[in-house]
Image: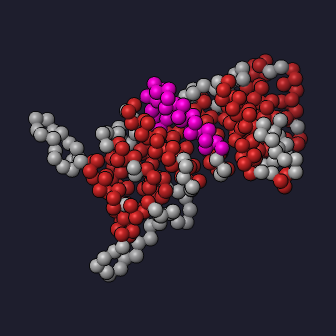
Amino acid sequence: MIDVALPHTRPTSSPHVAEFVTRVLERLKPLTSEPEIHNHIHEENTQEMDERTQAVKLLKTVLKWLMASAGRTFTTPVQQQLQLLPLLFKIAPVEIDESYDEMKQDARTCLSLMSQGLLYPEHIPLVLAALEEMAGSRSWHTRFSVLTYLQITVFYNLFTLLSLPVEVLRIRKLVMQLLLDEQLEVRDMACTTLSGLLQCQFFPLDSSLQTQLQTLSKTSLPKARGELASTDLVRRHAGVLGLSACILSSPYDVPQWMPQILMDLSDHLNDPQPIEMTVKKTLSEFRRTHHDNWQEHRQCFTDDQLLVLTNLLVSPCYYA
């Protein structure tokens, strides 16, 4: 019974979600400075527990409350609810491991449910601001989770977001930022996110995006592989991943732009890892999804392009 207004009665004087969340956040402050949050609470027969132990116990209760209330349309105190996102991103793991416990499971469930909530237009800038802040986290697990959260949020609020061109550009900028992430797993997830957004036509594959990706993919690398600069390799790989996302966004047809992008990708088949593997996976997926209607699709390529593509897909070195 929070913020309930019953018919023919006065609004409830308390409790209110905004006030409740504000008090909770104040008591959870001991956890915000911790690099990691573990479910280690030592039960001792003492009258006083330290603040961090109390905060962990409170967090467990808050997660249960969030699971009961999340997933619904956000109401007025969305600003306060979004302040809990940093904690959720901090404790929700990317993969299940030996330290996986109930608290982490609850955090993952909360993130999943909150990402499925239907947003009002005035709430979308607040959500994106929270995700942009988390995208700057030093933990790559957090940056990875931002992308999974963003995918679901966009698909559940697609038409609302499409009515806000400025926010669409913010999402595009955020995805491109994470496509250039130093962590390989984050770049791969950014590629998957970009491919999905292109496939549902959330934003178009226009000339500016193609030019940006092609420029990144042409980042120069030193000739000696032992002298590869990590920043240059990341930028080049980001460009190749972006081109790969373009190919994967059209699994059953051949748009006008696809033949040239395939040719651009073929130029990177002998690049250092992980670029080479990305190109091979993309070509393999292209062959799988376009095999059934290849007689029709091949009409979209020139003779020279067909020759290059045929050599790539059937060459023994491709499978080496």
> Is residue 284 in view?
no
Taking the magenta stretch, the answer to whether it contains residue 259 is no
Q: Nearer the viewer, residue 315 or 36?
A: 36
Q: Position of residue 213 (x, y in %)?
A: 70, 34
Could you tell me which residue is drawn at 31 percent across and 53 percent down?
22
Q: Is residue 22 left or right of residue 6?
A: right
Could you tell me which residue is drawn at 69 percent across and 28 percent down?
210
Q: Position of residue 166 (x, y in %)?
A: 49, 29
The single residue placed furthest to the left in the displayed view is 8
Taking 306 as reference, is 64 above or below it? below
Quadrant for residue 7, please give it. top left
Number of numbered callouts drawn: 0
Q: Nearer the viewer, residue 100 or 84?
A: 84
Taking 161 as reference, is 143 above or below it? below
Q: Position of residue 101 (x, y in %)?
A: 47, 63
Q: Position of residue 138 (x, y in %)?
A: 57, 55
Dominant secondary-structure state across the stretch colored magenta: helix
Could you tell me which residue is drawn at 31 percent across and 43 percent down?
77
Could you tell me which residue is drawn at 35 percent across and 37 percent down?
73
The single residue placed furthest to the bottom in the displayed view is 45
Q: Nearer the viewer, residue 127 or 320?
A: 127
Q: Is residue 195 left or right of residue 34?
A: right
Structure colour scheme: secondary structure
Quadrant for residue 31, please give it. bottom left
Taking 265 as reference, is 1 above or below it? below
> Is residue 201 in view?
yes
Taking the magenta stretch, the answer to whether it contains residue 158 is yes
| Residue interval drawn in magenta | 153-180
